[in-house]
Image (cartoon, rainbow, N blue to C red):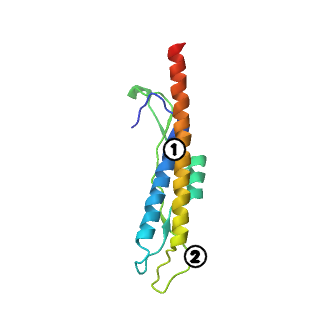
Amino acid sequence: MKAGLIQDPTAEAMGNFMTRLSRRQQVVASNIANIDTPGYKTKDVSFHLTMQEILSGDSLPLNTRKPEAGLLQGWAPIAMEPEVFETGGLPVRADHNNVDIDREMLKLSETSFTYAVATQLLRSKFRTISSAIQEGRAG
């Protein structure tokens, strides 16, 4: 159970999103590592499905907090592990492996870029909070 001074659903959702992006990086790295493994099938974590789940709240089951536990009454999101699936419809080589290095490198760079953007958004949010705290001390 997490309890913090500042509970922000946006920051928590971004953290969950970044966790999913990190998992996608691991899956893509695994695909690249298995490029010469006979019979290996490409795996992925869906970027669009992940965003849709986070924005709709499906990936964040709600858990009520009890005031007698000393926490604020409200809702607390709990992150779920992203689903990894085999990618279908890709051309298969003679060794029954369907990893395409160009496709994997594109996914790797796309995921890295998205992670960097999410990091910048969170950093900006925390700067805003820090600025508000500093102004409160001065005033």
Residue 63 image offset from top left, x and y in percent: 47, 40
Residue marked by disc 1: 119
Residue marked by disc 2: 89
Quadrant into which the C terminus falls: top right
Residue 9 in view in this figure = no
Distance between the alpha carbons at the discs numbered 1 and 2: 33 Å
Instruction: Look at label 1 and name its amino acid.
Output: Thr
Q: Nearer the viewer, residue 137 or 75?
A: 137
Q: Secondary structure at mark 2?
A: loop
Are discs 1 and 2 less than 8 Å apart at CB?
no
The image quarter containing residue 124 is top right
**Residue at the top extreme?**
139
Taking 59 as reference, is 7 above or below it? above
| Label at residue 138 | none
Residue 88 image offset from top left, x and y in percent: 55, 73
Taking 99 as reference, is 110 above or below it? above
**Residue at the bottom extreme?**
94
Number of marks in picture: 2
The residue positioned 53% from the left and 59% from the top of the image is: 109
Left or right of 129? Residue 66 is left
Q: Secondary structure at mark 1?
A: helix
Residue 19 image offset from top left, x and y in percent: 46, 50
Instruction: Look at label 2 and name its amino acid.
Output: Gly
The residue positioned 55% from the left and 39% from the top of the image is: 10
The residue positioned 51% from the left and 27% from the top of the image is: 130
Q: Nearer the viewer, mark 1 or mark 2?
A: 1
Residue 14 image offset from top left, x and y in percent: 53, 44
The residue positioned 55% from the left and 64% from the top of the image is: 106
Residue 138 in view in this figure = yes
Among the two numbered marks 1 and 2 on one chain, the one whose residue lies closer to the N terminus: 2
Q: Residues within 10 Å of mark 2 (few under 14, many from 20)?
A: few
